[in-house]
Image (spheres, helix red, strand yellow):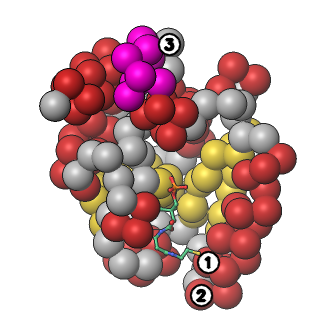
């Protein structure tokens, strides 16, 4: 039984995240989408909102479940008996950060393997922060996020 964790802040979940999660779900028996509290990043959506948006976006994937977490990722992975961390890799700019995270997580938990899935070209530039910025200016984001996420963003910025 290969269980993977795909961690992130998911503020909010995008088609880029969904591409990685879907491909991970094809490789692994089970995938846990781990939604990090990431309080230091001052997220737009609450942890529960981010988890709920991710849950709805992945509801069609039978071997995927969504769990919020706070604390260390390696502790979450161990508590859930996962053997693999799956991360998406976009442009070169991601590499330095992901390299550091993978090295640190390996130091903390040798038994946990980090695996990278390369983003396809259409999602190379896509990030939650770009989607939040576009939406904050009233620009449509339908090509970047599922409809329920676009609606949640519109509601957030209408306030
Ligand atoms: O989507 P993000 O914000 O790039 O995801 C970053 C995330 C949540 C994967 C990372 O910050 C993380 O693992 N946070 C949990 C706390 C932790 O374990 N920190 C040490 C990682 S080296």
For the residues labelled 2 and 3, say whether their Cβ atoms are less than 8 Å apart. no
Q: Is residue 155 left or right of residue 72?
A: left
Residue assigned mark 1: 105
Quadrant location of residue 101?
Answer: bottom right
Disc 3 secondary structure class: loop
For residue 108, which numbered disc appears in the image? 2
Question: Any atom of ligand 1 within 8 Å of the CB at mark 1?
Answer: yes
For the point 27% across and 46% down, which residue is it? Answer: 45
Disc 1 secondary structure class: helix
Where does the magenta region start and end?
134-142
Of 69 and 154, nearer the camera is: 154
In the displayed structure, would residue 6 be above or below residue 81? Answer: above
For the residues labelled 2 and 1, say whether their Cβ atoms are less than 8 Å apart. yes
- Spatial separation of the CA atoms under disc 2 and disc 1: 5 Å
The numbered mark, 2 or 3, whose residue comes first in the sequence reads 2
Estimate how packed mark 2 is, as few (under 14), some (14 to 19) or many (20 or more) residues with alpha carbons within 10 Å: some
Estimate how packed mark 1 is, as few (under 14), some (14 to 19) or many (20 or more) residues with alpha carbons within 10 Å: some
In the displayed structure, would residue 33 be above or below residue 12? Answer: below
Disc 2 secondary structure class: helix
Q: Is residue 158 left or right of residue 42?
A: left
Q: Is residue 155 left or right of residue 40?
A: left
Q: Nearer the viewer, mark 2 or mark 3?
A: 3
Secondary structure mostly taken by the magenta-highlighted segment of the chain: loop
135 in magenta: yes
Q: Residue furthest right?
A: 92
Of 58 and 16, nearer the camera is: 16
- Spatial separation of the CA atoms under disc 2 and disc 3: 38 Å
Across and down, in percent, residue 13 comes to 41, 37
108 in magenta: no
Residue assigned mark 3: 143
Question: Any atom of ligand 1 within 8 Å of the CB at mark 2?
Answer: yes
Across and down, in percent, residue 128 comes to 49, 38
């Amino acid at each position: 039984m290969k269980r993977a964790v795909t961690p992130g802040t998911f503020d909010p979940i995008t088609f880029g995240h969904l591409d990685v999660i879907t491909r991970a779900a094809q490789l692994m028996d089970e995938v846990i989408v781990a939604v990090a509290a990431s309080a230091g990043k001052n997220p737009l959506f609450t942890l529960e909102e981010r988890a709920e948006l991710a849950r709805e976006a992945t509801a069609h994937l039978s071997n995927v479940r969504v769990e919020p977490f706070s604390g260390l990722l390696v502790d979450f992975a161990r508590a859930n008996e996962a053997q693999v961390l799956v991360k998406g890799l976009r442009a070169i700019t991601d590499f330095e950060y992901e390299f550091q995270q993978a090295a640190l997580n390996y130091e903390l938990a040798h038994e946990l393997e980090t695996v990278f899935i390369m983003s396809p070209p259409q999602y190379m530039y896509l990030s939650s922060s770009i989607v939040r910025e576009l939406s904050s200016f009233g620009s449509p984001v339908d090509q970047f996020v599922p409809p329920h996420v676009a609606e949640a963003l519109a509601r957030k910025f209408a306030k």
